[in-house]
């Protein structure tokens, strides 16, 4: 009797099928994508309504003028070398780069559920290997993160139309915007791998994985506008692609090592 060989390709295909089925049938995925879609609409509409509002510090009497977005593309990114790129105002903080924190919440909940429910222990006992699990989770979380980035972009276009903001491109081209979006999507691979590492380290301790993910995200937050400016070119895309592949593989080995050396409960 000949037994069919259980190759890496077949194991990975099976693991991906399980992960994508669980992800696309889970309300969590659609809630997070929905939040990503609605968030920029609320930000653009509310900041436009508050643009020009003056607040006074009662202790010093200092006046602060609220400045909103001047055009839709500011919520997508800033031109490299510009003042907004290194600013710490509401325009530079409330933009698409926030999505990397939203993605961390999804990854920690998605991976953490495997350990808190006992699914991971049963999975590794019955069918999957640790490397198959890490690769499959990395791909699934990348797809989820990319979906949220795209949803935010769509929401930005809708929000800009509602807020009456101009869509005129100043100092950049449509190709630059496309390259910027591609760079940010590819950058998801690096961040999702880090969040998976935090999740497999914390296992069923969701609070710990979220703290680790947020802490690492805050440390790396300022590099996002530098690597993926609004005037991105093919060089930025290639750098993000290469960086994503290298970091995903390297951090993936770390996640696998943690699973191999530690208890699954």
Image: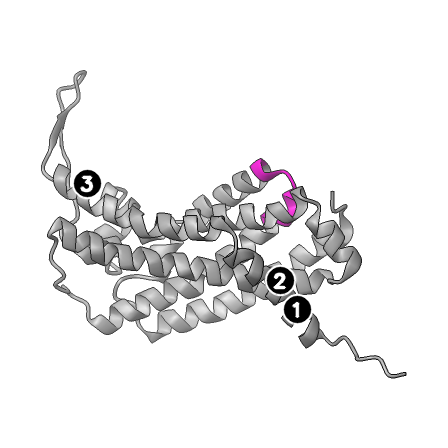
Q: Residues within 10 Å of mark 3 (few under 14, many from 20)?
A: some
Label whose residue precedes the other's in the sequence (3 or 2): 2
Which residue is labeled 2 in the image?
18
Residue 231 placement (x, y as % from top left): 25, 66
In the shown orientation, is residue 260 left or right of residue 230?
A: right
The reply to whether callout 3 and callout 2 are in contact (CB within 8 Å) is no
In the shown orientation, is residue 72 left or right of residue 23?
A: left
Residue in front for this viewpoint, 236 or 130: 130
Residue that appears at 55% across and 62% down: 20
Residue 90 placement (x, y as % from top left): 24, 41
Which image quadrant for residue 160?
bottom left
Residue that appears at 90% across and 83% down: 1
Query: Compared with residue 214, is residue 239 higher up or lower down, i.e. above or below?
Result: below
The stretch in magenta equals: 198-207
Label whose residue precedes the other's in the sequence (3 or 1): 1
The reply to whether callout 2 and callout 1 are in contact (CB within 8 Å) is yes
Residue that appears at 60% across and 59% down: 251
Q: Residue furthest right?
A: 1
Which residue is labeled 3 in the image?
46
Q: Residue 203: say if magenta.
A: yes
Residue that appears at 64% across and 42% down: 202
**Inter-mark Cα distance, 3 to 1:** 45 Å
Which quarter of the rendering shows the C terminus? top right
**Inter-mark Cα distance, 2 to 1:** 6 Å
Which residue is labeled 1 in the image?
14
Query: Compared with residue 240, is residue 74 higher up or lower down, i.e. above or below?
Result: above
In the shown orientation, is residue 173 left or right of residue 101?
A: left
**Inter-mark Cα distance, 3 to 2:** 40 Å
Q: Secondary structure at mark 2?
A: helix
Residue 167 placement (x, y as % from top left): 14, 61
Residue 63 placement (x, y as % from top left): 12, 27
């Amino acid at each position: 009797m000949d037994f069919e060989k259980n190759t890496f390709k077949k194991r990975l295909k099976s693991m991906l099928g399980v992960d994508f089925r669980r992800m696309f049938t889970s309300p969590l995925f659609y809630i997070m994508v929905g939040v990503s879609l609605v968030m920029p609409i609320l930000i653009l509409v509310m900041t436009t309504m508050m643009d020009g509002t003056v607040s006074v510090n009662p202790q010093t009497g200092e006046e602060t003028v609220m400045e909103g977005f001047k055009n839709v593309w500011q919520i997508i990114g800033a031109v490299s070398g510009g003042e907004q790129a290194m600013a710490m105002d509401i325009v530079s903080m409330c933009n698409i780069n926030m999505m990397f924190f939203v993605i961390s919440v999804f990854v920690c909940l998605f991976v953490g559920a495997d350990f808190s429910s006992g699914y991971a222990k049963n999975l590794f006992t019955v069918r999957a290997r640790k490397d198959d699990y890490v690769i499959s989770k990395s791909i699934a979380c990348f797809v989820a993160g990319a979906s949220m980035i795209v949803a935010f972009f769509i929401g930005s276009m809708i929000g800009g139309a509602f807020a009456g903001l101009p869509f005129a491109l100043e100092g950049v081209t449509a190709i630059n915007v496309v390259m910027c979006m591609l760079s940010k999507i590819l950058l998801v691979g690096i961040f999702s791998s880090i969040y998976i590492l935090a999740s497999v380290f914390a296992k069923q301790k969701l609070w710990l994985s979220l703290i680790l993910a947020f802490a690492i995200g805050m440390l790396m937050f300022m590099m996002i506008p530098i690597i993926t400016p609004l005037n991105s070119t093919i060089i930025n895309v290639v750098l993000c692609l290469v960086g994503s592949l290298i970091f995903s593989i390297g951090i993936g080995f770390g996640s696998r090592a943690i699973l191999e050396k530690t208890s699954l409960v």
